[in-house]
Image (tube, rainbow, N blue to C red):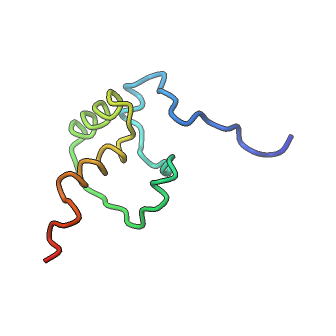
Amino acid sequence: MSGRAPKRGFASRPADPERWIKASDASPPRDADAAGFTARLTIDVTPELRGRIKIAAFRRGQTVADMLRDLLVREFPPDQGDT
């Protein structure tokens, strides 16, 4: 035995979506592009909003982090505030 943990699927769907929604988001980024990000943003949201965000990401086939990054890029384009 090599001592390595078994490799997990890249985008495996949760068997129990309700449990997944309520689970902690403590796992590290899964995609290579996320490794290039150097800052972490923490916000407080209600459990209900967090659940709605996770459901929306799941339905879109995205991670919550990727979905929120896309939203922030759309809302705050690079040229905004560069004056």
- Assign the N terminus to one quadrant of the image: top right
Nearer to us in this view, 12 or 74: 74
Residues 46 and 58: in front is 58
Residue at 30% x, 30% y is: 55
Asked if residue 71 lies left or right of residue 9, the reply is: left
Q: Position of residue 67 (x, y in %)?
A: 31, 43
Q: Residue at x 59, y 33 (%)?
A: 9
- Locate residue 26 relative to residue 75 in the image: left or right: right
Give the side of residue 37 with respect to residue 70, left or right: right
Farthest-out residue, bottom: 83
Most distant residue in the right direction: 1
Above or below, 7 against 77 in this view is above
Residue at 52% in and 29% down = 12
Q: Whole-percent x and y of residue 62?
A: 38, 36
Q: Is residue 51 above or below residue 2?
A: above
| Residue that sits furthest to the front in the current view | 79
Residue 82 picture location, percent across and down: 17, 74
Q: Which quadrant would the C terminus be assigned to in this image? A: bottom left
Judged from this view, the residue extending furthest toward the top is 15
Image vertical order of residue 44 relative to residue 50, above or below: below
Q: Quadrant of residue 81?
A: bottom left
Residue 19: give x, y in percent of width and height: 41, 28
